[in-house]
Amino acid sequence: MYVGIPVSSVRDFFLMLAMPFIKRNSGARTASFAARLLIVLLSIGAAHAVEPLPVDEIAPGVFVFHGVTAEQDAHNRGAISNAGFVVGSRCVAVIDTGGSPSVGAALRAAIRTRTALPVCYVINTHVHPDHILGNQAFIPDKPEFIGHARLPAALAARARSYIQSAERQMGEFGRGLELIPPTRTVADREELDLGGRTLRLRAWPTAHTDNDLTVLDEATGTLFAGDLLFVEHMPVIDGKLKGWIAVTAALAGGDYTRVVAGHGEPGSGWRDALERQRRYLQKVADETRAAIKGGRSLSQAVTEVALDEARRWALADLFHRRNVTTAYAELEWED
Ligand SMILES: [Zn+2]
């Protein structure tokens, strides 16, 4: 059921329609019919009472939900990353779907408070579960699911572990998961037409992951960077450190009006945010190289490398050692 107004208002509307039957007809049969009608309508309302995610319209027709900076758990349901949607004259494109079907359903409900147009595209910026596990909520819309050409392989390799950790970390919100792979992939660059509005998709070389995809809304100059940009939340290296440093520099040279990060809000200061991220990644690279050259072991390096830079970021306790471990493995055998 698609409604452009809150479900509680729909229920009130049906109640309003039913009230004259109750008031004007004293016959028991009519009263009984009205009561049953009310029960049915109330239960329909309850079944669809999905609380919409709060979204900001950051530019005309561009809406963003900002996730909390935290690990996924049963309290936040996996709403820990940013997600958004862009509305054209023909249809809507969703960009990332949150970290559980529940968050995906709430994003879908948010779309319905803004437009009655169909969702024609669900775009995933990369494989990580906090950006992709909401996909299944959009199956009824029959959209094209779009991702990087390497997304299907990454998803297949990780499906089991994502499903297991989702249930462990989010309880009931992590159950009954279906991982929805892309029905259409992007190897380089592609355009999507939303009706009078073009999205430019770009598949990047390995950086944050090996399947990072960005989405540029041409009309407003808004770039959805996915996790190629982290703000506040420590950047997490799951691809190639050297590749990500290069892509961070490439993004900094871009001509965007605004950038939506995968985590946190850079606002108009997206170039500064990219520079902060570049500084951390470069420091990890430089000091890891020095540690390897100095004969330090991996277990020594994780307690020594880039600690000053790490302290500037949220969730460093969770991710910094992991980042140094990834960097060490990548840089140990470089020429
Ligand atoms: Zn990610």
Image (cartoon, rainbow, N blue to C red):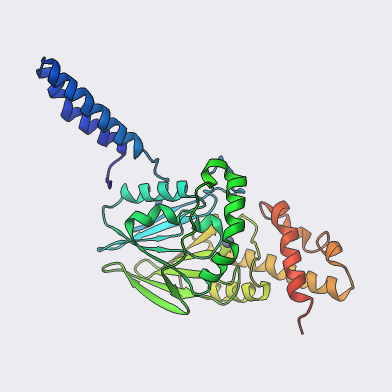
Taking depth in this image into account, of 216 and 269 the one nearest to the observer is: 216
Taking depth in this image into account, of 179 and 22 the one nearest to the observer is: 179
Please tell me which residue is depicted at 18% across the width and 24% down the height of the picture.
34
Q: Position of residue 42 (x, y in %)?
A: 29, 30
Name of the residue lying farthest toward the bottom? 335
Q: Position of residue 46 (x, y in %)?
A: 34, 34
Q: Is residue 50 above or below residue 260?
A: above
Please tell me which residue is depicted at 86% across the width and 63% down the height of the picture.
300
Picture quadrant of residue 138: bottom left
| Numbered-mark total | 0
Please tell me which residue is depicted at 30% across the width and 68% down the height of the picture.
197
Q: Position of residue 282 (x, y in %)?
A: 70, 71
Name of the residue lying farthest toward the right? 295
Is 266 left or right of 197, judged from the image as shown? right
Residue 36 visible at all:
yes
Q: Is residue 106 above or below residue 222?
A: above
Q: Position of residue 281 (x, y in %)?
A: 68, 68
Picture quadrant of residue 278: bottom right
